[in-house]
Image (cartoon, grey):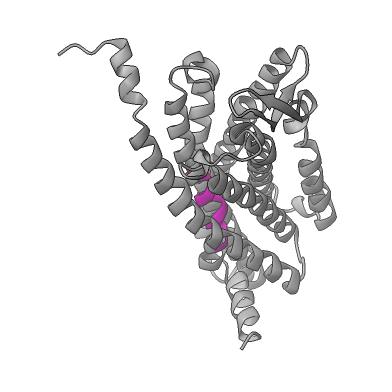
Amino acid sequence: MNVTTSQMKQLYFDPIILDVFMVLCNLVLGELIGLVGLAANVITIIIFCKNGIQDSVDVTLTALAVSDMGSLITTQFWNVIVNPWTLTVRFPFETFEVVTLVSFFPHGYFVKVSGLITSFAAFERCLCVVLPMKVKNIISCRNSLFINVMIFILALSDIATPYYFLYFGWVFSPERNSTILRVITKDNFATPISYSYFYSDVFVPYFTFTVLISCTIVIAVSLKRNAKWRSSVSMEKTDKAAKKATLKELKVVRMLTVVSVIFIVCLIPLSVTTTAVALVNDLSILGPYFNVARLCYCVSFLTETVSSSMNPFVYFKMSSKYKKGFFQLFSRCH
C-alpha cells in the first residue's frame, strides 16, 4: 500500500502519541529524576564546601554541580509549563514563546556551561597524566576557580543574541479578544539569530565532544603506557608515597572519565536534534514536521536531566572522600 506525503505527515502528527510521550518523558520521568538530581547536587555542593576546597578538582566539580542545578531547575519549569494539560489553559501569555525566553534559552546556557566545565575537567586530568610533575604549577585552585568563573561569564554569549533581538511585550490577540504577553522581535533578527543558533547549538556541543573524546583517548593511552612502566619496576624500588599518590590520581581520572562518557552519551540526542533542525527546514517551529522535533526534544531533555542528575552518584560510587563526607553530613543530622 502506497503512503502519500500528506498521509505521512498525518502519521507524524498524531496528537495522542505526542501527548503520551510528553507526559511520560517530561512530566513523570523528567520531574522525578530532576527532583532527585536537584537534591543530589545540593548535597554535593554542601559536601565539597564542608570538606574544604583542597584541590582544583574540588573547585571544578563544585562549579559543575552549580551548572547542573541551573540546568535541572530550568528543565523542571519547562516540564511543568509545557505539557498537554497546561497547554490547554489560557494563560495571559503565549506559552511557548514566553517559556522559550524564561526557560529554554537559560537551560541551553547551563547545559553549555556544564559541557565546557566537564571538558576543562577532562583536559585538566589529561595534563595530570601527561605532565604529572608540572601540572600543579599550571593549574592551581586559584587558576581553576578563575577558569570556571570565566566559563560561566563567557558562556553568556550563548544567550546574548537571542535576548538582544527578542523581548517581551503586550500584544492584542484577536483570537482571545484580549491583550496577552508575547515575544516581540526586533528588525533584521533572522540572520543574527541563525548565526547564534549555529554557534551555540552546533559548534559548541561538537567542540565539547571533540575535547572530551580527545582527552579520554590521550588519558587511556597514557595510563596504559604508565601501567607497563610500573609493572617493570620492582616493588622495592617503588616509593610507597608515590604509589599512593598515583593510585589516588588514577581514581580521580577514572571517575572524571565516567562523568565525561555519561555527558557525551546523554547529550548526543540533543546534538543530533539541533543539527537536524538546523539542516531540515521542515523541522523548524513553523515547519510541517515540528511535532517530530518536539518528540526528539522530549527525549533530549530527559537524557539531559539524567546527565545533570547522575554525577553525584558517580562521585559516591567512585570517590571514598566524597562517600566519607556524605556519611559525615547525614550522621550529623541524627
Q: Quadrant of residue 40?
A: bottom right
Quadrant where the N terminus sits is top left
- Residue 194 belongs to the span the image colors magenta: no
* Percent coordinates x, y for residue 152 in the rendering: 77, 43
* Percent coordinates x, y for residue 224 in the rendering: 50, 49
Q: Main secondary structure of the magenta part?
A: helix
Q: Is 216 on the left-hand or right-hand side of 239?
A: left
Q: Quadrant of residue 14?
A: top left
107, above or below 255, in the image:
above
245, above or below 299, in the image:
below
Magenta-colored span: 303-312
At a point 47% along the width and 42% down the height, the residue shown is 265
At a point 73% along the width and 24% down the height, the residue shown is 184
Q: Nearer the viewer, residue 230 or 14?
A: 14
Q: Is 188 on the left-hand or right-hand side of 302?
A: right
Q: Nearer the viewer, residue 214 or 261?
A: 261
At a point 59% along the width and 33% down the height, the residue shown is 96
